[in-house]
Image (tube, helix red, strand yellow):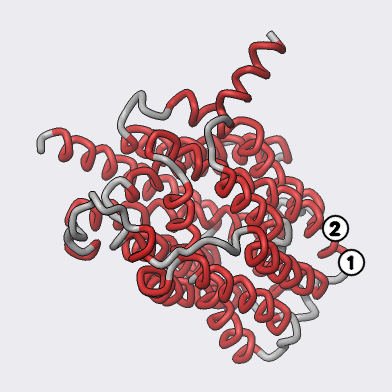
Amino acid sequence: MITRTISLYREAYSGLSRSTWLLSTVMLVNRSGTMVIPFMTIYLTQPSMGYTIGQAGAVMGLFGLGAVCGGFIGGRLTDKLGFHPVQLITLAGGGLMFMVLGQMTSYPMICITTFILSLVNEAFRPANSTAIAHYSKEENRTRSYSLNRLAINLGWAFGGAIGGILASINYHLLFWVDGGTNLVAAILLKYCLAGTNSAPHHYLKQHEPEAPKSAYGDSEYLFFIIFTVLFASCFFQLFTTLPVYYKTYLHMNEFFIGMLMALNGLIIVLVEMILVFKMEGKKESLFYISAGVLIVGLSYSLLNLLPQLPAMAVICMILVTLGEICSMPFMNSFWISRTSAKNRGQYAGLYTIAWSTAQVLGPSGGSQVAEHFSFRSLWWAATIVCISASLGFRWLRKRQSFE
C-alpha cells in the first residue's frame, strides 16, 4: 500500500520541466509571506484601528478594484514585454508597497495605498499564468498549474500559521514579512530564470496561426468569465468575512483562525496533484469546474445548518478546499486551451480581472450583507450564488458539446 502510494505521487509529479519547478519555488517563497490579506479585515476592525466591518469591507473592495486594473495592465504588458520582466517588476514593487501600507493609519491613506498595492501586486498574475503555459507541455499543463497552486498553498499554509502567531504579537509584523518575501521572490526569479527570453515574438511557435479573435470577442469565454466572477465572489468570503464571523460571533482566536487558513493549504499540498493526475483528461474541464463550484456552495450552507462549534469550521474548510481543488486547476486549463502565444497575456489578464472583480464584489458586498442583515443571510446568499454559477458552467459545457 505504501509502495503504491509513493509510486502514485512519483507519477503525479513526473514529466514537469525544470523551469516549472523553479517558477513554483519562487511562488513558494513569495506566498510563504501571505499574511496581510487574510488578517486585513480583523486588523482594521481591532480597537487600535477602530474601523467598522463596513469600512474594512470597503478597503478590501478597493484591493479588488486595484486588482482589476492590475489584471488589465499586467495582461497587456505581458503580451508586449514578456512575462519575465513583468513578474520581476511587480514582485519588487508589491513588496515595497506592503511595507508602506503597514505604516498608514488614516483611513484615506489606507484606501489609496491599498489600491496602489493591489494594482502592482495583481499585475503579476497574468505574467505568471503565461509563464506556466510557456514552461509546460499540453499533456501536463493542468498539473503544471496545480504544481504552481501547490507552491502557493504550501506557502499559504505556512504564512497563515505564522501570520496568526505574528498577529497575536503585533499586526505590523505582517506587513514587513509579507513585503520581505515579495522582494526575496523577485531576487530568486531574477537569478533562477534570468536566461528566459519571454517576449511573445521570441517564443511564438512558427507553426501557430495568426492570433485568434480577441478574448473580449470570445463569447464562450465571456460567459465563462461571468460565472467565474459569481463563484469567486463567494469564494473570497473565505478570507474576508468568514474570519470576522469566526472571531466576532464564534469567539475563536487568531491562532485558531490562522490554523484554519493553514488547513486549506495543507489539504491542497497533500492531495491536489494526485487528484488532478487522476482526473486530467478523463472528462472536460467544465465538468470538474461545475462540480467543484457546487461543493463550495454546499459548504457555505453548512455554516447555517451545523452546530456553531470549532469542528463545524474544520468540516466547512475541508469541503471548500475539495471544491477548490476540483474547480480551479481546470479553470486554468479551460482558458489556456483557447489561446495562442500571441494573445495569452490578454486571456490571462481577463481571467485575472474576473477574480479581481470578485475581490471588489465579494468582500464589499459580503460585509454589507453581514452588517445590515446577518451572517446567516450571507451564507445562504453565497450558497445560492455558487449553485447558480455551477449551473452556468454546466450550461456552458452543454453549449460546447453541441458545437
Tell me, yes or no, if residue 326 can be seen here. yes
For the view shown, which residue lies furthest in the left direction?
A: 403
Q: Disc 2 to disc 1, how far (Cα)?
A: 7 Å
- In this rendering, would 66 be left or right of 93? left
Q: Residue at x 21, y 64 (%)?
A: 214
Q: Residue at x 56, y 27 (%)?
A: 12
Residue nearest the observer in this picture, 17 or 379: 17
Residue type at tag 2: Ile
Is residue 256 positioned above or below 391 on the image? below
Number of marks drawn: 2
Tell me, yes or no, if residue 369 can be seen here. no
> Which image quarter holds the C terminus?
top left
Is residue 303 positioned above or below 278 on the image? below
Q: Name the residue that disc number 1 marks.
A: 169
Q: Residue at x 73, y 66 (%)?
A: 184
- In this rendering, would 344 be left or right of 242? left
- Determine the secondary structure under disc 2: helix
Q: Name the residue that disc number 2 marks.
A: 165
Residue 252 locus on image (x, y percent)? 77, 52
Residue 390 locus on image (x, y percent)? 33, 41
- Determine the secondary structure under disc 1: helix
How packed is label 2: few (under 14 Cα within 10 Å), some, or many (20 or more)? some
Residue type at tag 1: Ile
